[in-house]
Image (cartoon, rainbow, N blue to C red):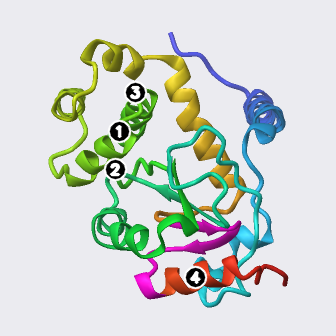
């Protein structure tokens, strides 16, 4: 037996389908708005300085915007009372960061001696460094055992990746307590410390690595030794006013 549809029934069915489609669109818009309102406070806002040309604030000392970058409890070398503080946000899989850490930073520290305090904070970039977050957490675990700089050198020398086995092998090689390191690697507090670095980096307009803050002035991208030395001289002389 065949069912016959009257023309009027066809029109009504089409109208119902249109109404259902419209209801789905409206419901989706409402849900999207609710999610936006819920999530928006969790995403750090980028100011005008943060979204402009990444290189635009790195052309000169006076062009660089200034920020109050926290350093308390972060890995550092040099006297806390040094006239100049340099904060580097780094990613251990970043080849430019590796070159800075192995070629520029040692000379910078030898050249400037007690004039600077050098601080490292983490900004792992997932698309650049698989397991970069885990590597940053591992560095924090080395910092907890007061062997950050030895472990940092091992991370920058690593070229095969940052799986747990390699990170633990580096810990053993530099003399870290293996049990303590393993427990720290899985601890929520270690991850939260790295996450705080990432959030602060976003708030200060960090968009890549390395990014340097010299007495609060932001410089994105690699800096040659001569330029860093000059910026330290300007900072030490109090050349911080706009």
User: Mark 1–mark 2 contact, CB under 8 Å?
Assistant: yes
| Label 1, label 2: how far apart the Cα atoms are | 9 Å
Q: Residue at x 33, y 39 (%)?
A: 131
Work out whether 215 lies above or below 237.
above
Depth check, front residue: 99 or 23: 99
Q: Which residue is mark 1?
A: 135
Label 2 secondary element: loop
What is the CA distance from the residue labelled 3 to the residue labelled 2?
Answer: 25 Å
What separation in Å lies between label 3 and label 4 (alpha carbons)? 37 Å
* Relative image position of residue 207 (x, y in whole percent): 57, 63
Q: CA distance from mark 1 to mark 3?
A: 16 Å
The residue mark sitting in front, 3 or 4, is 3
Q: Nearer the viewer, residue 92 or 202?
A: 92
- At which x and y percent is residue 77? 48, 52
Against 80, is 18 above or below? above
Magenta-colored stretch includes residue 219: yes
> Which residue is identified by label 2?
129
Q: Nearer the viewer, mark 3 or mark 2?
A: 3
Mark toward the start of the polypeptide (3 vs 2): 2
Give the numbered dot on residue 55: 4
Q: Decide if residue 240 is on the left or right side of residue 227.
A: right
Q: CA distance from mark 2 to mark 4?
A: 22 Å
First reached walking from the N terminus: tag 3 or tag 4: 4
* Residue span colored magenta: 211-226
Query: Which quadrant of the rendered structure holds the C terminus?
Result: bottom right
Query: In the rendered view, does 185 fall on the left or right side of 193?
Result: left
The answer to which quarter of the image holds residue 15 is top right
Q: Nearer the viewer, mark 1 or mark 3?
A: 3
Q: Which residue carries the number 3 mark?
A: 145
Please tell me in which quadrant of the rendered image residue 46 appears. Answer: bottom right
Q: Secondary structure at mark 1?
A: helix
Percent position (x, y) of residue 219?
Answer: 59, 74
């Amino acid at each position: 037996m065949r069912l016959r549809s009257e023309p009027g029934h066809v029109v009504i069915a089409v109208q119902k389908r249109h109404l259902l489609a419209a209801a789905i669109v409206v419901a989706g818009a409402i849900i999207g708005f609710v999610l936006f309102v819920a999530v928006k406070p969790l995403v750090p806002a980028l100011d005008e300085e943060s979204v402009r040309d990444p290189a635009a604030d790195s052309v000169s000392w006076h062009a660089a915007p200034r920020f109050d970058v926290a350093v308390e409890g972060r890995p550092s070398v040099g006297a806390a009372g040094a006239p100049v503080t340099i904060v580097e946000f780094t990613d251990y899989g970043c080849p430019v960061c590796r070159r800075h850490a192995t070629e520029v930073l040692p000379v910078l520290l030898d050249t400037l001696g007690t004039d600077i305090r050098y601080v490292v904070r983490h900004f792992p970039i997932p698309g650049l460094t698989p397991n970069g977050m885990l590597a940053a957490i591992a560095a924090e675990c080395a910092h907890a055992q007061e062997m950050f700089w030895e472990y940092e050198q091992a991370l920058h020398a690593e070229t095969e990746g940052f799986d747990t086995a390699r990170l633990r092998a580096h810990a053993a090689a530099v003399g870290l307590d293996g049990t303590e390191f393993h427990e720290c690697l899985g601890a929520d507090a270690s991850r939260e410390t790295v996450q705080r670095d990432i959030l602060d980096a976003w708030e200060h307009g960090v968009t890549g690595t390395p990014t340097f803050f010299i007495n609060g002035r932001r410089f994105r991208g690699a800096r040659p030794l001569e330029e860093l030395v000059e910026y330290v001289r300007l900072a030490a002389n109090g050349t911080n006013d706009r």
